[in-house]
Image: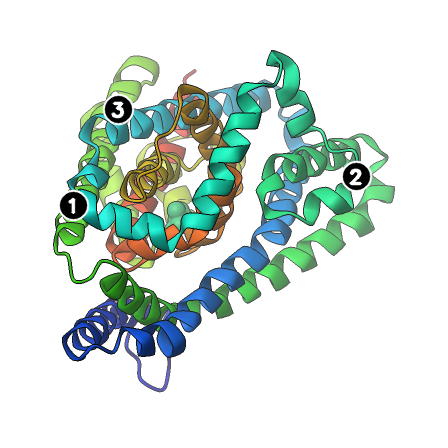
């Protein structure tokens, strides 16, 4: 995405925003101008986060409905449909679990100075204490209580609170499955309406993401003053980025080749070779949706997967299967919790896992698609969405990598399904 007037790519502007934000924060600390940052700069970062939160529920709702309604071919391709979904779900679960495992063992957020963590907790005190109350209440509830967390009794109330993401997802899935089961001619206008809505919402996301450089500048300036110039935060961010990079490389160069070797008729060498251009395209565009035609071409022409399989498995994969994103979101959520000094219990960690599996499915295949979803997942697991400020500045290169993983995952499943 480039701005025609300046033709500086968006990610460069985001990186620049990060640097400018750090400078503003450092200058404010040096001249005692923290009040200025707090009153005049940070609110712009807050605005960016609010916009992300604003669009989250409509986005998840419409993306999920479009994804499921698009499966109308499931009955036509019933041989493929169930198997494809099962493989995708397994892949996402493995990737998200891997992310959770890495986040918990490497603990990149633990590098931050304990005093700085206390400062952060002070800054986010009200939200963190709300979360503690919720956790306390959850402990006292029965084992089947999750049912009422998932099934709302009123969709308007459910959609009125960003922390009810699961309830909105439940309604969207229920709605879409019902839409699949009514006569197609009746469903047609509704599907067309959702397609239109999807385009509009993606356009809105595009506008919001264009605002990212300003948001990132403000958030970084606020972060530097919140941390009182403590550099341990940057060490922690470095370790966090490294953890994500290693995770992505392991999924791409160990997990997928292993799956190809065991479950497909292709050699790992042929697969890796055919995937290079696709990965490069995904890496540069940061959009698995934009990469779809390139993935299709490589999978059909270079790997000889049948057109029937490729034209079903790959488009579904772009909406449903985001292994890189699932793994990344798990690491990001744990990192933010660690930096904010929030100790997650086992059941909360399982919730993070569950939510990342679901929310990666609801993430659109566009650059920075994750920001929007992550803002919502954070709230629904009780972590302040402002924590996004910690990671947004360095997100673009990680986005490039996870997009390359996402498209490779789709191609891997296409090869596995096509086994004759
Ligand atoms: N950019 C990613 C994709 O298109 C989505 C994300 O932000 O994780 O696959």
At horizontal 40% and vertical 52% (from top left) the residue drawn is 124
Q: Is label 2 in a helix, a strand or a loop?
A: loop
From the viewer's perspective, tell me whether residue 84 is left or right of residue 252. right
For disc 2, the marked residue is 154
Foreground pick, 197 / 327 = 327
Task: Inspect this view and state whether residue 377 appears.
Answer: no
Of badges 2 and 1, nearer the viewer stands 1
> Is the residue indicated by label 1 positioned so its CB lies within 8 Å of ligand 1?
no
From the viewer's perspective, tell me whether residue 276 is left or right of residue 325. left
Q: Earlier in the sequence, mark 3 or mark 2?
A: 2
Foreground pick, 261 / 251 = 251
* Quadrant showing the N terminus: bottom left
For disc 1, the marked residue is 113
Disc on res. 79? none
Q: Position of residue 211 (x, y in %)?
A: 43, 72
* Separation of residues labelled 1 and 3 (CA atoms): 35 Å
At horizontal 46% and vertical 41% (from top left) the residue drawn is 129
Mark 1–mark 3 CB contact (< 8 Å): no
Q: Earlier in the sequence, mark 1 or mark 3?
A: 1
> Is the residue indicated by label 3 positioned so its CB lies within 8 Å of ligand 1?
no
Foreground pick, 306 / 315 = 315
For disc 3, the marked residue is 255
Alpha-carbon neighbours of circle 1 within 10 Å: few (<14), some, or many (≥20)? Answer: some
Q: Is label 3 in a helix, a strand or a loop?
A: helix
């Amino acid at each position: 995405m480039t701005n025609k007037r300046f033709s500086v790519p968006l990610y460069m502007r985001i990186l620049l925003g990060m640097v400018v934000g750090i400078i503003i924060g450092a200058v404010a600390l040096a001249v005692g101008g923290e009040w200025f940052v707090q009153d005049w700069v940070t609110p712009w970062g807050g605005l960016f986060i609010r916009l992300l939160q604003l669009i989250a529920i409509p986005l998840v709702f419409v993306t999920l409905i479009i994804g499921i309604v698009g499966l109308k071919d499931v009955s036509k391709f019933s041989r493929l449909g169930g198997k494809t979904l099962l493989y995708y779900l397994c892949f996402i679960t493995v990737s998200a679990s891997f992310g959770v495992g890495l986040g918990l063992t490497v603990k990149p957020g633990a590098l931050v100075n304990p005093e700085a963590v206390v400062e952060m907790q002070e800054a986010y005190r009200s939200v963190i204490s709300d979360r503690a109350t919720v956790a306390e209440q959850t402990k006292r509830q029965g084992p089947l209580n999750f049912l009422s967390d998932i099934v709302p009794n009123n969709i308007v109330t459910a959609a009125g609170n960003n922390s009810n993401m699961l309830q909105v997802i439940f309604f969207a899935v229920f709605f879409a499955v019902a839409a699949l089961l009514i006569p197609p001619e009746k469903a047609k206008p509704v599907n067309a309406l959702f397609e239109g809505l999807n385009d509009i919402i993606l356009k809105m996301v595009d506008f919001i993401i264009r605002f990212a450089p300003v948001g990132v500048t403000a958030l970084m300036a606020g972060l530097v003053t919140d941390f009182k110039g403590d550099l341990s935060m940057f060490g922690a961010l470095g370790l966090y980025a490294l953890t994500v990079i290693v995770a992505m490389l392991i999924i791409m160069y160990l997990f997928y080749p292993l799956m190809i070797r065991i479950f497909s008729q292709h050699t790992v060498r042929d697969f890796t070779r055919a995937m290079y251009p696709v990965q490069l395209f995904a890496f540069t565009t940061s959009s698995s949706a934009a990469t779809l035609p390139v993935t299709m071409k490589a999978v059909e022409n270079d790997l000889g997967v049948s057109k029937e399989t490729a034209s079903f498995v790959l488009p579904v994969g772009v909406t449903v299967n985001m292994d890189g994103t699932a793994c990344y979101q798990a690491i990001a959520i744990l990192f933010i919790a660690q930096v904010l000094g929030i100790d997650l219990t086992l059941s909360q960690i399982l919730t993070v896992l569950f939510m990342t599996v679901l929310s990666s499915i609801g993430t659109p295949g566009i650059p920075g698609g994750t920001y929007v979803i992550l803002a919502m997942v954070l709230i629904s697991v009780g972590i302040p969405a402002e924590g996004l400020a910690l990671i947004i500045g360095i997100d673009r290169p990680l986005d490039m990598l996870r997009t390359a993983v996402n498209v490779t995952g789709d191609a891997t499943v296409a090869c596995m399904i096509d086994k004759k």
